Amino acid sequence: MRSIIRVIGAVQGVGYRPFILRKATEYGIKGYVKNLGASVEILAIGEDADVLSFVEVLKTDAPVGAIVLDVRVDEITDTSDIYPSFRENSPESEYFSIINSSEIQFNDLPIFLPDIGICDDCMSEMLDPSDRRYRYPLISCASCGPRISILNKLPYDRDTTTMDKFKMCPKCDVEYRSGRRTHAQTISCHDCGPQMILDFYSDITDHTDNESKGKAVLQHIEFDDAVITATELLRNDNVIGLKGISGYQLVSKPVGTVALKLRQLKGRENKPFAVMFSDICSIKEYCHVSEKEEELLKSSARPIVLLEKKKDFDYEVCKDSRYIGAFLPSSGIHRLLTDAVGPLIV
């Protein structure tokens, strides 16, 4: 049986093609999968029962973050018109493969995936001193990380995102071809990916030249030193601007004097500030959390959830509200900062 299958929905940027590769191999299917922009196209060649079972799985199963709206199946008799370089009885026809994307077809409305909060696996790797991505603040994989904010055009491939500027190192290149980062377009590490940079002005207070005393000097720090210095600035009651996924955030400790400074900077007189916590246990120190609220907090959208207070921050943080707008880190840099400083207004 030979079938062309089109899966329509949010199937870009969630590791959908590697998912198809694994399922096809499991069912003994030969052929290929490729991106079409608003969908993926699958050529499935195999025994009738295997292909039909494979199609049913596509209707009911998908990787985290994917949204399948429709699965369309057409039986064919000849594969040469579908993918000219694919020939049955050729070496490549003996297995299932991921092939290059085709020219985009917009017969169906494309669904743009939102940026996805850091997954548990990436968080574990970033916090593991033995992992090569230990303390890499922009860690991501096929199941998490920036999506629409880095997309230049469809289909969602490395060279159609802003990640095209970063050439993969040999280790990332190997991981891109197999494992849980297969075809993860945001794959990167300390050696080859985007890095944190900290620019700030510091006063000269210990210079022997009296004319230099009190003058502000621009400091430029990179890599993990930037993260470490940023934590020191936060601990010393400064407000920092954090350029993250999709834009900038102002970050500070949730203490009265700093929160008041932040209110003056933003012109925000009374509205409560949302507070980011490093993990769910930290949230439970300050808030009552139901099972449903915990589920929401941990979801990939990383929403701000209004929770009843157990204990409060200084008045300037939440004002008269009986709730704390609490949320969890959506990226590695957030977790590194909250681990080092504690809860933060973000």
Image: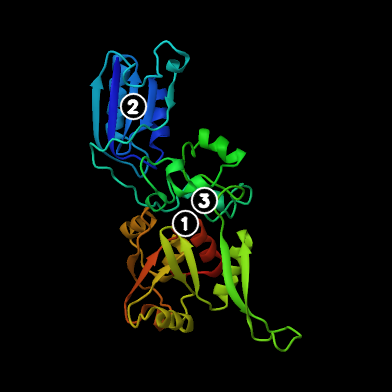
Residue type at mark 2 is Ile
- Up/down of 9 relative to 117, above or below: above
* Position of residue 145 measured from the top left corner of the image (x, y, whole percent): 44, 50
Residue 139's tag is: 3
Q: Quadrant of the N terminus?
A: top left
In the displayed structure image, the side of residue 240 where residue 303 appears, left or right: left
For marks 3 and 1, the one nearer the N-term is 3
* Mark 3 or 2, closer to the camera: 2
| Residue occupied by mark 1 | 331
Identity, as a three-letter code, of the amino acid under mark 3: Ile
Distance (Cα) linking label 3 and label 2 = 30 Å
**Residue at point 51%, 44% (across, down):** 187
Asked if marks 1 and 2 touch (Cβ < 8 Å), the reply is: no
User: Residue 79 versus residue 229: which sits nearer the camera?
Assistant: 79
Q: Quadrant of residue 285?
A: bottom left
Split into 4 quadrants, where in the image is the C terminus? bottom left
Query: In what element is the residue under mark 2?
Result: strand
> Which label was assigned to residue 42?
2
Against 323, is 214 above or below? below
